[in-house]
Image (cartoon, rainbow, N blue to C red):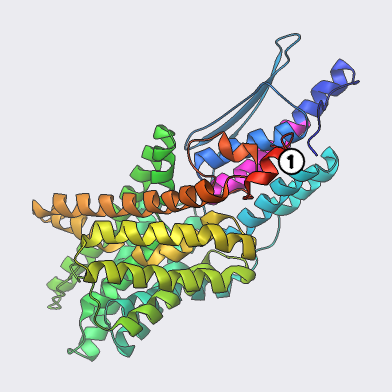
Amino acid sequence: MAVSNGTAGMSSTDAADYTRAVLDIAIRVTEVLFTNGAGAEDAVAAMQAVTHAYGLRNIEADITHTLISLSWENPATYETISRSRNVKYRTLDYHKLTRATELIGRIIEDPPSVPDARRQVAAIVGGAPAYPRTLRRIGWAIVGTGAAFLLGGGLIVAAASFVATLFIDVITSALQKRRVPVFYQSVVGGAIGPLVAAVVYTLDPGVNPSLVVVATIIMLLAGVTTFGAVHDTLSGFYVTGTARLVEAVLITSGLVAGVLGTTLLLTRFGIVLEIDGTMAPSIEGLTMQLIAAVIIVFGFALAVQVPLRAFWAVCLLGAAAELLYLLFIGAESGIVFASAGASVIVGMLAAIAVLVVRVPPLVVVVSALIPLVPGLALFQGLLQVADADINGLLSLLTAAAVAAALAAGAILGQYLVQAVLGPARKLQRRFVGPLMALPIQLGRKKVHEHTDRV
């Protein structure tokens, strides 16, 4: 049960210390969520849930792309105690995200003592990764391999994509440790694809080298999903949503610069690579495309450390997303509406699946929709713009529309499930959109039985 008044009976000094400790718990566990892909709405909800559970009212929580702030005002003296943290890094670690979500769920239901909660938060922040670094790197390489198969490449292209993406991850990780700006990391990553493609083309001129390049690009863009940007924008956090979108465009621009620069350099040595980013989706070869989608999702889940208990769910929903997308394409609904239709159904299925695998909806939804992320269209658009082709603007608009359709569709799927089953916690009913990174309960009956809970 939530604490009714956490500072009741305390001296002013002890009450202030208690308040600072609770704010620290709330903001640190929120930082884990936000830096690992959670939306701004989820972050604000997490801070409110934790402080409410420990008996603090009059809380003001806010978040931007780089700053998390939390303050409490004493209703008697109007004294304000504030905490803020700068977001110094961003990554995708769904193991830590899930652990933070589980801790928030325990705090909501039965808050542990403040010292115990602080120890648990510290254990999450400083905890070891779920999988060794080697496995995570292999996971990113598997994403590139699956992308090669999805684009219609054979074993040679898939093997080359595996080697290229593995090498890209090693190089970009080293650059990240040296605090090289992410744009230049993207330039280096984009440059590696054409080099490997040139080697493959030299060994076997019958191979389409553009498949190797595009496969590596899709792998690099897999971790730069626009889901968070669209989610933040739809829920009213326009500054954070715009910043995330700019970050995604900046990274993609770096990839284009790397690919174009390397391609021009190879041309000087007589190796001409025609980069084709216009492969259209087709219902032909359905079985291979479903297998490729599962490979991509499996590799992504390994790379971002999805809890092992959820692997079957994300792979199954990934195949379902690809199947639905291709069926909508076969019905001539267009790639935007095909993406929207597939993501709505996947969002609904994910809302149910997370109750079984016990992970936040964000983990399942993002992982399952990775094969549909419009990285190829976005890459093609910037490539055309770089060549002064006006059609590039249309490609960019198409990519933006697909990204918005994926995120909005998945969120709508969550809405529809909650409309039928109902949100069990009042916390879920306080915000514009469904919470994607917090522990979710469904069922109208629980709302009336536990109205004192957040």
> Measuring 46% from the left and 50% from the top, which residue is drawn there?
416
In the rendered structure, the answer to whether residue 392 lies left or right of residue 243 reads: left
Residue 331 versus residue 392 in the image, above or below: below
Residue 51, percent across and down? 71, 32
Q: Is residue 226 visible?
A: no
Res 152 → quadrant: bottom left
Residue 337 versus residue 63 in the image, above or below: below
Residue 140 versus residue 88 in the image, above or below: below
In the rendered structure, the answer to whether residue 126 lies left or right of residue 66 reads: right
Name the quadrant of the C terminus. top right
Residue type at numbered disc 1 = Glu
Res 268 → quadrant: bottom left
Residue 25, percent across and down? 72, 38
> Measuring 31% from the left and 81% from the top, which residue is drawn there?
286
> Measuring 20% from the left and 62% from the top, which residue is drawn there?
260
Q: Nearer the viewer, residue 281 or 346?
A: 346
- The span picked out in magenta is 21-37
In the rendered structure, the answer to whether residue 127 lies left or right of residue 375 reads: right
For disc 1, the marked residue is 449
Q: Nearer the viewer, residue 417 or 11?
A: 417
In the rendered structure, the answer to whether residue 443 lies left or right of residue 38 reads: right
Residue 396, percent across and down? 21, 51
Residue 23, percent across and down? 71, 31
User: Element type at marker 1?
Assistant: helix
Q: Is residue 14 visible?
A: yes
Q: For mark 1, does the 10 Å Cα neighbourhood hold few (<14), some (14 to 19), or many (20 or more) residues?
A: few
Name the quadrant of the N terminus. top right
Q: Is residue 27 magenta?
A: yes
